[in-house]
Image (spheres, rainbow, N blue to C red):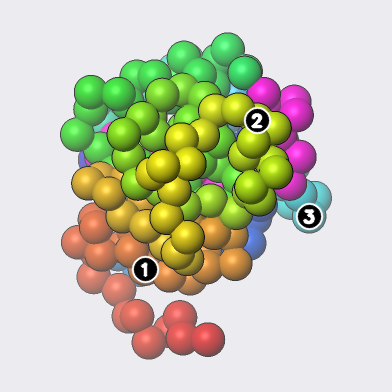
Amino acid sequence: MYTGILLYPRFSEYELSVLLSILKQGRKPIVLIGLDKDAVKGEAGLACIPDVRVEEVDVEALDSIVLPGVDDFQHLDRHPSLISFLGKFRNKNVWIGAISSAPYFLAMSGLLDGKKYTTGLTSEQRSFLDTFNNATLIEAPVVVDGKLITARGSHFIEFAIKIGEALDLDFDRSRYKH
């Protein structure tokens, strides 16, 4: 089973840094998933090449999927391929991790429905986007609800550790103290 890492233009590289290290330590196979097969540049300019496009992903081979935040997601607002891909996880028994602004993608695809969550988006941003249920928002660094793990971007270390623990990976937590 794989962990899928979703990549889209302007994704936050640093939010994945510790998670990638933990996955590597735990010998967890990953697959980089893009909206297409072109190189994807993160917000700091790091170019990554997806292994597969969202349409090619074998969802049955994934036990987890991670969505990094993005510093400007206007180009992803109501993105049909992204919504369609995420919709495939509605009734799947997989871990879903979303950090910073990425819970927005879960909200727009219905994956946050009835779930407790946190996000790095402000109250004004959530109101403007009009997809969030504020009744289930928890003002905390990291929130776990069932198999959903959400976090604020500045808490990427705790987020990564929670995912590593959820996947029962063998990794050295002491490497990630701050």
| Quarter of the image where one finds residue 161 | bottom left
Check contact, mark 1 vs mark 2: CB within 8 A.
Answer: no
- Which of disc 2 and disc 1 is earlier in sequence? 2
Tell me if residue 117 comes above or below residue 80 in the rendering: below
Q: Is residue 19 left or right of residue 10?
A: left
Q: Position of residue 64 (x, y in %)?
A: 31, 42
Residue type beneath disc 1:
Ile
- Which of disc 1 and disc 3 is earlier in sequence? 3
Q: Nearer the viewer, residue 178 or 100?
A: 100
Which residue does the image show at 27% across and 49% down from the upper left? 145
Check contact, mark 2 vs mark 3: CB within 8 A.
Answer: no
Question: To which residue does mark 3 refer?
Answer: 44
Which residue does the image show at 75% across and 29% down from the upper left? 74
Tell me if residue 101 comes above or below residue 144 in the rendering: above
Whether 61 is among the magenta residues is no
Q: Position of residue 90 (x, y in %)?
A: 30, 24
Question: To which residue does mark 2 refer?
Answer: 129
Residue at the front extreme? 135
Which residue does the image show at 34% across and 80% down from the upper left? 173
Q: Which residues are magenta?
A: 62-77
Residue type beneath disc 2:
Leu
Question: To which residue does mark 1 refer?
Answer: 161
Which residue does the image show at 47% across and 60% down from the upper left? 139
Q: Report, in whole angstroms, how far the alpha carbon at label 1 lies from the one at label 2.
A: 29 Å
Q: Position of residue 123 (x, y in %)?
A: 64, 47
- Which of disc 3 and disc 2 is earlier in sequence? 3
